[in-house]
Image (spheres, helix red, strand yellow):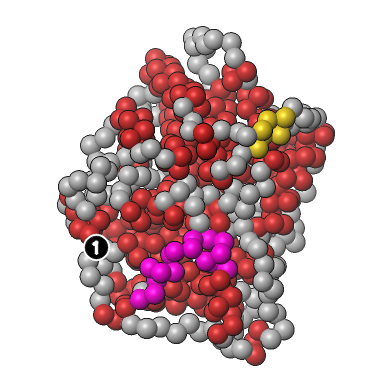
Amino acid sequence: MPVKQAIEPPPKRQRLDDAQHKQSQPPEIEIGLGPLLAHNLNGRPCNLDGANLHSSPNSGGDCGSFQSPAAGSWTQDGFSQDPDFLASQEELRCFLFSLANSAVPTRASSPDAAGSGDSLEQLVQPLPKDSRDSWHAPLSEGRHIQYLKNYVTEVAPWIPALAQEFPALSYAILALSARQIERKNGVRNWYDSLELYQEAIRRLSPLLQVRDTKVVAACVLLCCLEMMSARAQDWRRHLEGCAALFSAFGIHGFSQGVLQAIFWCYARMDLCGALISDGTQTTLLHPCKWLPPGCQDEDAYRLFQSVKSPDMHANYAVYLCMKATQLVSDRTKFVELGEDNGCTTEEFQTRWLLLWNGLQCWLSERPDELLPVQTVSRKPFPHILFVHWAAISSNQLYHTACILLLKVLPKGVRLPRSPALFPLWHARRICGISLANPHQGCLNNSIQPLWIAGQLFSHRSEHKEIINLIRGIEAETGWGTCWRIRDLESAWGCR
């Protein structure tokens, strides 16, 4: 049944003061925002499944044809239609592109992957004194502490230390935390998050010529807040500014220190945007920009292997899944749109085999931390338990990338018979991993893999289990995910 598109105008936003919130103090809660930043900004793979956040795309545009979210769903709570938010969003977008355009292409903007040559400090310029002055959030002390505690506990424990003398980042942190709590509790008046969001942008505006990691971090946090409240068909628009910024400043997956962590936070969001497009698009940040300048695709394995950590091996799964979206997109455009991108039948087969072998190599070379500690055959889905949080989403992305490739398996390719050649085998494991690992840091990250896997099932018991999974994620995290249920029901033909 079509959903009415008209949205009631939001109530007028009020000033923040203690009296305003006396009747709506949200309780202390555990939240599910960790997927976005907690692991990313600690130099670990981030949880990004961002793609689960919003109302589903309608037909047209880059995102293909999807169903709209259920009527009355609070995933469209009016925040993204608020005139004040829309004006501030456009202001931030202009700031990001202006900041990107102000970047001078020098070696200083591209920290060396190996740690030699250019250093992180060469990227940073001193912050103006005005940006380091003490600040006062437009909140009561109690709410300020609540939002900060929420952020430190569930999102990125050490980021507030970076923000102590940088108000723009401080406001971005509080805005994101406030918005998550508002959505978790179904608050529709969004007083705190909107005003904090606007204040963060106001503090960023004078810093157009400043190339500092805290500026980039604040922009990424605000981008997260926007996508938390936006429609899925607008996903890429919210990422465009950050993509331009990363490209202009040469921030990549092997940048040093904080920049590397921020990159992988962004990269997972960008990947989710590509997965939402259902094979029509790859990431906004060109795949060549994921590696250090001068590096080619064939250098990726060596680069990731040179960093001996389970976190970077998990990031490698993100990279490989991104390459799968690129290959599928290139082939789709070559065959269906006649785009002259070189993805001929021969070239496609060569690239397909290289990527498939790369994925199987990733699987066989997983460090102990990324291996399951228990696998139990159950119906409808196996129970696959991991201890290390990074193992959860990275293994799901491996299976997701395999499904994407198997859907477009070249006719001339012959591979040794293996369970890994069956898309349904991968799909069952994607669902089994989510069922067995209800980790806060990976719940949101599983939505797009569940969508890709879920389309392959035909039995009602399987459908019911997947629907319960998706509903549980929204209830647990506050991020809108249930629009994917309608998409799956449409794919199953059982509205």
Residue at 53% in and 49% down: 47
Write the residue at 24% across / 46% down.
Answer: 115
What residue is rendered at 43% in x and 64% in y? 159
Position in image of residue 153 (x %, y %): 56, 64
- Read off the magenta span: 150-165
Does the image show residue 348? no
Asked if residue 345 is positioned above or below residue 182 in the image, the reply reads above
The one of 277 and 324 positioned closer to us in this rendering: 324
Label 1: how many residues lie within 10 Å, few (<14), some (14-19) or many (20+)? some
Residue found at the far bottom of this picture: 19
Q: Mark 1 points at which residue?
A: 124
Farthest-out residue, right:
460
Residue 47 painted magenta:
no
Identify the amino acid type marked 1.
Val
Q: Circle 1 sits in a helix, a strand or a loop, which is it?
A: loop
Q: Where is residue 43 in the image (x, y as percent from the top left)?
A: 42, 51
- Residue 37: percent from the left, percent from the top? 49, 56
Is residue 156 highlighted in magenta? yes
Relative to 106, is 289 on the left or the right?
A: right
What is the chief secondary structure element of the magenta stretch? Answer: helix
Give 192 or 75, whichever is nearer the viewer.
192
Residue pictured at 59% horizontal, 48% vertical: 442
Q: Looking at this view, is 429 or 336 the one in front?
A: 429
Q: In which quarter of the image is residue 435?
A: top right
Q: Can residue 423 be seen in this view?
A: yes
Residue 458 is drawn in which quadrant? top right
Q: Residue 206: image x %, image y %?
A: 30, 75
* Quadrant for the C terminus in the image: top right
